[in-house]
């Protein structure tokens, strides 16, 4: 029996993974089972299992955490196991790489987009915004009564950082220099939305799930969110929603959002035979056919270009997500294992800046924290 450690604790995801593993196991003549723990526990469990020499054959890490395990020398280069990246965009190859070595194969990726209530925008005569000025103006016009123009997550967790990166990166900001004018401008833009009354003051406490709840309840005309919410959105047939790329500072600029999702890795277990079969299991789970099945179930975008083209044809309403993925990049691309320190520093900066401190002061402190590690 071969084991895959993952975070598929949600009933539907657990079932989809079980079905995929059964198909691949049958194809390869082995039994493949999953061991699922909450996402926040995958890394600690994998490290604990490594120390007791009881690692599973495959570990599915969140891509932002994978470099930590790779840096410790715990992962196998997937190319040595025969996995190809021929039909995988460079950004997604980087997403699963650490210091140029390909350790993690993605089945699908996700990113953020601007979701909007088509009926509310049509009634208000507001066009879908494409620039920051248009977004700020639209959010003001759509704020009425208990309804805010926009909802986003600026909470003190990775959700908030994930949602800030499109504003930071599209403005030319860089996670290696958090106190640069470009990053300050991006946080000032969030502050302006809050000052206008277009964002709820609760945004500093909201997760991405909370944001979706507000949108579905009619308390927000637009939201920043990801495709993992689509299944829930579709549970309300009266909700007429659409998506667009996240607005940019100036017309014509690239909207650069973060790539999200998980990658399948093969840890070093010391058993060459099992390692080779683990590589074949990963290759099967990330095959074009399996990627398309998984992506259509989960509303994520396939990592393989051929599967993504078929996905676009089958779910044209999510075309903007595929466009957003084309320019998206990994959070760990430039910092590798140093990303968590920057993320924690940014989380504190949001809390300070959105509750009164200047963006400049909050981000100067964040840069100091990221550099010193405390």
Image (cartoon, helix red, strand yellow):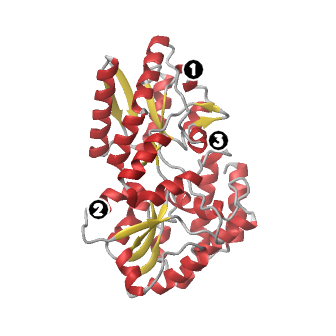
User: Does the CB distance between marks 2 and 1 fall below 8 Å?
Assistant: no
Q: Quadrant of the N terminus?
A: top left
Residue drawn at (64%, 71%), measured in percent from left and top?
249
In the rendered image, which quarter is residue 192 located in? bottom right
Q: Classify residue 98 as left or right of residue 301.
A: right
Judge whether residue 291 can be spotted in this image: yes
Residue drawn at (57%, 20%), measured in percent from left and top?
80
Residue 350: x and y in percent read 59, 66
C-alpha distance separating marks 1 and 3? 22 Å
C-alpha distance separating marks 2 and 1? 42 Å
- Which of the marked residues, 3 or 2, is nearer the chain's N terminus? 2
The residue that label 3 is drawn on is 336
Using the image, tell me which numbered label, if any, was put on residue 158. none
The residue that label 2 is drawn on is 234
Residue 128: x and y in percent read 48, 75
Q: Classify residue 19 as left or right of residue 210.
A: left
Q: Classify residue 230 as left or right of residue 132.
A: left
The residue mark sitting in front, 1 or 3, is 1
Residue 242: x and y in percent read 40, 68
User: Does the CB distance between marks 3 and 2 fall below 8 Å?
Assistant: no
Using the image, tell me which numbered label, if any, was put on residue 80. 1
Question: Label 2 neighbourhood size at 10 Å, few (<14), some (14-19), many (20+)?
Answer: few
| Front-most of residues 68 and 234 | 234
């Amino acid at each position: 029996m071969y084991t895959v450690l993952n975070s598929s604790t949600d009933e539907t995801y657990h079932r989809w993974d079980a079905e995929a593993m059964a198909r691949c196991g049958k194809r390869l003549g082995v039994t493949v089972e999953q061991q699922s723990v909450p996402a926040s526990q995958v890394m600690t469990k994998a490290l604990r299992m490594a120390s007791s020499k009881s690692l599973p054959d495959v570990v599915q890490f969140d891509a932002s955490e994978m470099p930590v395990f790779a840096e410790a020398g715990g992962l196998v280069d997937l190319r040595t196991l025969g996995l190809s990246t021929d039909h995988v965009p460079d950004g997604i190859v980087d997403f699963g790489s650490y210091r140029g070595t390909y350790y993690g194969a993605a089945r699908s990726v996700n990113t953020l987009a601007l979701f909007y209530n088509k009926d509310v925008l049509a009634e208000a005569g507001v066009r879908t915004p494409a620039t920051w000025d248009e977004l700020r103006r639209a959010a003001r016009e759509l704020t009425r009564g208990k309804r805010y123009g926009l909802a986003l997550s600026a909470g003190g967790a990775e959700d908030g950082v994930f949602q800030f990166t499109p504003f930071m990166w599209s403005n030319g900001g860089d996670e290696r220099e958090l106190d640069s004018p470009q990053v300050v401008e991006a946080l000032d833009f969030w502050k302006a939305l809050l000052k206008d009354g277009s964002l709820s003051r609760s945004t500093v406490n909201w997760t991405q799930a909370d944001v979706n709840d507000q949108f579905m309840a009619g308390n927000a005309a637009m939201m920043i969110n990801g495709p993992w919410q689509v299944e829930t959105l579709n549970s309300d047939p009266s909700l007429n929603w659409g998506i667009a790329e996240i607005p940019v500072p100036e017309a014509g600029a690239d909207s650069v959002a973060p790539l999200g999702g998980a990658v399948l890795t093969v840890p070093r277990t010391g058993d060459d035979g099992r390692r080779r079969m683990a590589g074949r299991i990963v290759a099967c789970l990330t095959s074009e056919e399996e990627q398309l099945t998984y992506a259509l179930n989960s509303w994520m975008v396939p990592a393989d270009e051929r599967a993504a083209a078929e996905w676009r044809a089958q779910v044209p309403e999510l075309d903007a997500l595929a466009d957003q993925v084309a320019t998206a990049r990994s959070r760990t691309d430039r910092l590798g294992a140093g990303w968590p320190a920057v993320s924690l520093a940014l989380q504190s900066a949001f809390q300070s800046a959105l509750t009164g401190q200047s963006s400049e002061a909050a981000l100067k402190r964040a840069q100091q924290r990221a550099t010193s590690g405390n």
